[in-house]
Amino acid sequence: MSHPPDGPPADGPPADLGEYARRGLGAQTRAGILVAALGAAVAALAPTGDIVRGTSAAGFGEVTREADIGITVVALVAAALLIAAALAPWAWAHYAGIGLGAGLASFCLFLVVGARSSDDFGSGTELELLGGGQLLVAASVVAMAGVVLALVGARAGEPPGESWIATASGTSGKAVAALALGIASFLLGTVTAALAITFATRAAIDMRAAGGRLGGRGAAIGGLVCGVVFLVLWYLGFLALALFVEPSAD
């Protein structure tokens, strides 16, 4: 009994679904990006309710902050881009999907923080998070869960091909990029932090495949540590603000 050749033909589609799923950064990364797309779909529903309610700064009853319909447009565009990134067979599309998912998670919380700190509310007013705000927080949590799933899955992506391994030398460009992005995350937040983790993970795979002929281990570790630390600090900080920040005094 004959067996089909390994891998896809040169000019044709992948030989089977398993081979297709191993391209790029792996099936788990694809799944994580799709989860982030689900978070975008949840965010698109936010304008069905208001974000937050509290006492008016003028002292005349209560006021609410609405979720603008523009949120739906942005969220639907993000969902479409995330789905496209997940289905694409290229590693760069998966990098983009991870960055977009992290940005979406922060964007949803930023909207809630902006609404809670509005000048419409009196200083120190106790605010109530309404349906639209709850949807934005939920969307952010789902999107970030997808990013984490994608980051973990990046470790299982397809290793470099034999032709690349045969010529590998010098310092890993991915390791250098990971360190630069990790340091930049101090100022730029979750998007660069998530990308730093991804590049550091992929650099480790490249260096392991190269059998010691590719340097940059220290840069990859530094990028990974910075990425993890700043991803956690930025995201948890935004989440805390979205849930607890109150209007400040004038």
Image: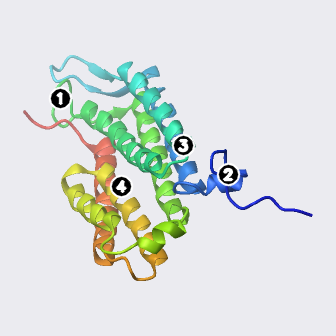
Front one among 118 and 33:
33
Instruction: Tell me the CA gap for discs 3 and 4.
Output: 18 Å
Residue bearing the label numbered 1: 122
Foreground disc of the pair 4, 1: 4
Which residue does the numbered mark 3 point to in the structure image?
88
Q: Earlier in the sequence, mark 2 or mark 4?
A: 2
Q: Which residue is mark 2?
A: 9
- Quadrant assignment for the N terminus: bottom right
Q: Earlier in the sequence, mark 2 or mark 3?
A: 2
Say which residue appears at 33% left-offset and 52% top-offset.
235
Q: Position of residue 28 (x, y in %)?
A: 58, 56
**Quarter occupied by residue 3:** bottom right
N-terminal of the pair, mark 3 or mark 1, is 3
> Which dot, 3 or 4, sits closer to the camera?
3
Query: Is residue 130 something that shows in the picture?
Result: no
Separation (CA) of disc 1 from disc 2: 67 Å
Q: Residues within 10 Å of mark 1 (few under 14, many from 20)?
A: many
Distance from disc 2 to disc 4, alpha carbons, whole Å, reads: 32 Å
Q: Position of residue 114 (x, y in %)?
A: 25, 33
